[in-house]
Amino acid sequence: MMQYFNRVLNKARCFAMTLPVIAALSAPDAFAQDADSGTGQPLVYGPKIGLTSSGFYEGFLNGRQHTGSVTGVAVGGFASYSLLDFLDVSAELMYMQQGGTRVELKESIVDGSLITTTGNVKLHNVEFPVLVRLGMPNPVLGIRPQLVFGPSVGFNVAAIQSQDITYFVDAFNETPAGLETFARTGSGTENVRSEYRSMQYGLNVGLGAKIPLEGGSNTFFFDARYRYGVNAINNGYDPNDLLRDATDIRSNTFLFSIGITL
């Protein structure tokens, strides 16, 4: 009996001595599986690019669009930290083109004739959004839809207005009508940075998707969100403008962007 017990004890000792070797050999596979699943990398970062569609609006109460919209680009980078499988917090640093279209109608101080200016204003901003990304607990076909929301701060570095200026001039013509109105139009570009405020604040809300790529080492992000301008971005208004009935103009923007983790 004692001999049998000693043989069992010796086998147990041998098995115990082999456990560290087995653990050392299996550790790389375990770490590889953890990296493939993404659980070993809660903090990810990468580049981002997108398109914008922006317009000027006359404040929150009436919400009227001032005139038209302009299209621009957005490019930059992001960093995202995963708090839970379905909850991320991200920060972005983006160069973003925003703006809108404005129309002005004035009287000439020389002869009182009308002058119409139609300008496409493109605001060149550096945007810093901080976003919460709330996704579904379980992915659908490997894709995790997300609700994206959060504030942003923008700093305006330039404002360029491409404009058409039309002069309406009354002149005599050799016709029975006599006095007639003639229109002359000229085009140009003007730096209107002084007409806009440097700091521009916004609130963002939209939908996104988080798509792990094959192999699990990279993740693809897609966003479609709306940025509402919180503060007025214009430095007052021109009292000589016959069309201007609002003192506050805000810039609201649709952003469609894609990004990938490195």
Image (cartoon, rainbow, N blue to C red):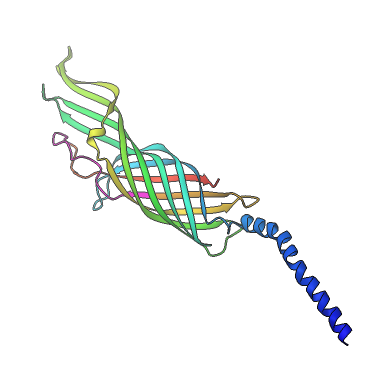
Q: Is residue 192 above or below residue 129?
A: above
Residue 8 in percent (x, y) is at 84, 79
Q: Is residue 177 visible?
A: no
Asked whether 235 falls inside the magenta stretch, the response is: yes
Residue 238 in percent (x, y) is at 16, 36
| Closer to the camera in the image, 127 or 257 | 127
Residue 136 in percent (x, y) is at 52, 62
Quarter placement of the C terminus: top right
Image label count: 0
Give the prevailing secondary structure in the magenta stretch. loop
Taking the spot 57% from the left edge, 64% from the top edge, the residue there is: 138
| Closer to the camera in the image, 36 or 198 | 36
Asked whether 233 falls inside the magenta stretch, the response is: yes
> Is residue 130 shown left or right of residue 216?
left
Residue 117 in which image quadrant: top left
Residue 121 in which image quadrant: top left
Taking the spot 73% from the left edge, 59% from the top edge, the residue there is: 25
Q: Is residue 177 above or below residue 258?
A: above
Taking the spot 24% from the left edge, 51% from the top edge, the residue there is: 62
Residue, far bottom: 1
Residue 156 in percent (x, y) is at 31, 38
> Is residue 161 shown left or right of residue 48?
left
Quarter placement of the N terminus: bottom right
Residue, far top: 174
> Is residue 212 shown left or right of residue 78?
right
Which contiguous range is marked in magenta? 227-242
Q: Is residue 96 visible?
A: yes
| Closer to the camera in the image, 207 or 178 | 207
Taking the spot 40% from the left edge, 46% from the top edge, the residue there is: 254
